[in-house]
Image (spheres, rainbow, N blue to C red):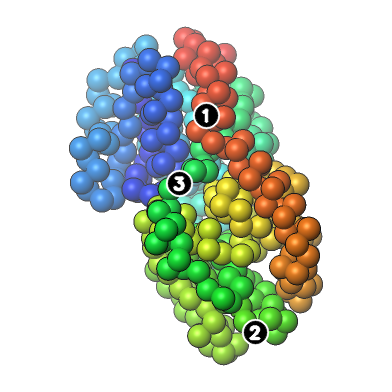
Amino acid sequence: MLYQIVPEFYQYDAISQHARNLERMMTDAGIPSRICAQRVYPESLRATVLHVDEVFPDLREDDVILLHFSIYTPLIEDLRSLPGRKIMIYHNITPAHFFEGISRKTAEACRKGTQQLKEATRTFHLALGVSRFNEVALREAGYENTGVLPLVVATNVDDGKTFRSLYYLSEKITLLHVGRWAPNKKIEDLVKVFYWYHKINPESRLILMGRNWEWENYTVGVLDLIKRFHLQEEIKIIPSLSPRDLAALYRASDIYLSMSEHEGFCVPLIEAMAALCPVVAYRAGAVPETVDQAGLLFEKKDYPAIAEGIHTVMTKKELQNRLKTEGKKRAQIFSFDAVSRRFQSLLPAILVKGRN
C-alpha cells in the first residue's frame, strides 16, 4: 500500500490537489493507495482522507509513505521510527525573512521546516522536487537521491464560458493575480505596477483573487497602499472562487501579473497560460523555470518599466499572440497526461525495496 501524507489537507489547495492527481495516477497504474492527513478542511473530506493516527500503527515494511513537505511538521519526527519506504515530495519552504515583523509564528515554522529539511536526509529514501529549482534546494540540503515530479495543472477546465466568462468580461484592460496574500507574493508591488499602468491606460483594472486573512497586518498595509494611491474603485479583491469561476476569470483577463520574490513552482502562471492570458512576471525563484520562454519576465522591480511592458503586450498584437501561443504550448507540459508519464518513469525508484 502507498500512503500519501498531506499534513494539512485543503479542498482547493495546490498541494492537496497534487495528492489527488497522484492518487488517480496510482489507480491507473494498479497501485493501491490512500491519502491521509493530520488536519482536513472542510471536515466533510474525512470520507476520503484518513487521519494519520489511523494509518501509522498498522504500517508494514512493504508499505510506501509519500510525504508532501512545505513547512515544519512534527510528522517528520514520527516517520523516523516507522517501517516502510519513505519518499518526500518537496514543495519548497518560503524563507523565514519574508515573515519577519509580520508573523513570528509563521517565520518560526519556516525556520524550523528548513532545519527539518536538512536533518531528514537519512529518513527519506528518495526526495522529489516539484520543480528543478526545488531539486537544487534538496541537493543543497544534502539529499543524494533526488528527482523532479512537476505538479499537474488543470489546462482544460470547463468554465461554462457561455455565462461565466461573460460575467467577468470588461471593456477595461484586466490585470489579474491569483494567490494568497503572503508577503513573498509582494501584493504591494502588484499595486505599484498597476498604479503606473493605470496612468498609461486609465481604462484598466486590477483583480486580486486569493485569501487575504492569514496575515492581517500585511493585508492592512496593502489596503492602506491602495487607498493612498486612490485605486479603491480600480482594484477588485476576490477572496475565493470555485474552479470553474476561476477558469472563467483567467479567460476574461488580459494580463497575468506576478511580482512574487519566492516561488517553488507557481501554479497560477500555468493556469493563466492555459487560458491564453499572457504572463508578465518578476524573475525570481522557480518562475523562470515554470514560464520558460512563454512569458515576459523582468529582472528588476522598475515599476514604470514593467507597466510599459504590459502596455507593449497590449498594443503589439504580434507579441501578444506569440505569448498566447507559447503559453498554451508550455501549459501542456503540466497536463495530467504529461505528468502521468513522468510519474510512470519514476515508479521504479518510488517502489523499489531497500535504501538506495
Q: Earlier in the sequence, mark 3 or mark 1?
A: 3
Question: Looking at this view, is 310 or 69 the one in front?
Answer: 310
Q: Which mark is residue 158?
A: none
Cα separation between marks 1 and 2 = 42 Å
Q: Amino acid at mark 3?
A: Val
In percent of the image, x 46 and y 73: which residue is there?
A: 237
Q: Position of residue 244 (x, y in %)?
A: 40, 53
Q: Are marks 1 and 2 in contact (CB under 8 Å)?
A: no
- Residue 337 is labelled as 1
- Looking at the picture, does residue 280 appear above or below residue 336? below
Q: Earlier in the sequence, mark 1 or mark 2?
A: 2
Image quarter (top left, top right, bottom left or bottom right) of the N terminus = top left
Q: Which residue is mark 3?
A: 157
Residue under label 2:
202
Q: What kind of element bears circle 1?
A: helix
Where is residue 338? Give x, y as percent: 57, 29
